[in-house]
Image: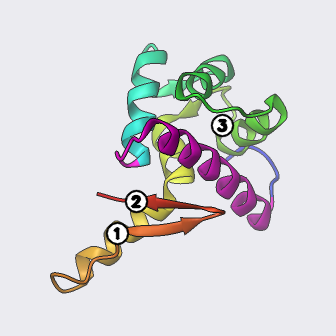
Amino acid sequence: MGGNVSHCGDERLRADINHKLLAVKKSRRDVRPTHKLLQEAVTTISSDGQNLTFKDFQRVASRLGMIVPEKQLRAVFARLEQGQGVVVFSDLVDFVCADEGRIALANQAKPEGRQQHEIRVGAGTCKLD
């Protein structure tokens, strides 16, 4: 993957992006999982629904209503792009929604009635379906 961002830097970047996405979801009262919100925006912006140029990446953030400095968008893009000037949607979801995946896997292993339905990310809470 592109970029030379440390693991700790990745976690800070992921937490900040998640915090901004959660703020958008809260302001819209949108309870859908984050990956579905991202998928809708990417499908609308990307010509193939899978690969995002940096300009597409900026449009996705804008469509979601996220206020993200260009420097931070470039840092996320550099972290995810595969050396070909594009970010693949699945890599974006893996990076941004890693906690949703961990919760889903944990819920599969728990007995009925003991599912975890929210996680803490930064200062926000992410409710999951």
Question: Of 4 and 30, which appears nearest the observer?
Answer: 30
Residue at image coords 58%, 45%: 23
Residue at image coords 73%, 34%: 68
Q: Quadrant of residue 120?
A: bottom right
Q: Give the mark nearest the N terminus, 1 or 2.
A: 1
Question: Of 128 and 60, which appears nearest the observer?
Answer: 128
127 vs 25: above or below: below
Q: Which residue is mark 3?
A: 81
Q: Quadrant of residue 20?
A: top right
Disc 3 to disc 2, how far (Cα)?
28 Å
Q: Is residue 34 left or right of residue 64?
A: left
Magenta residues (range)? 6-33
Callout 1: helix, strand or loop?
A: loop
Q: Which mark is residue 127?
A: 2
Q: Position of residue 13 (x, y in %)?
A: 73, 53
Instruction: Specify whether residue 46 is in view.
Output: no
The kind of residue on which mark 1 rests is His
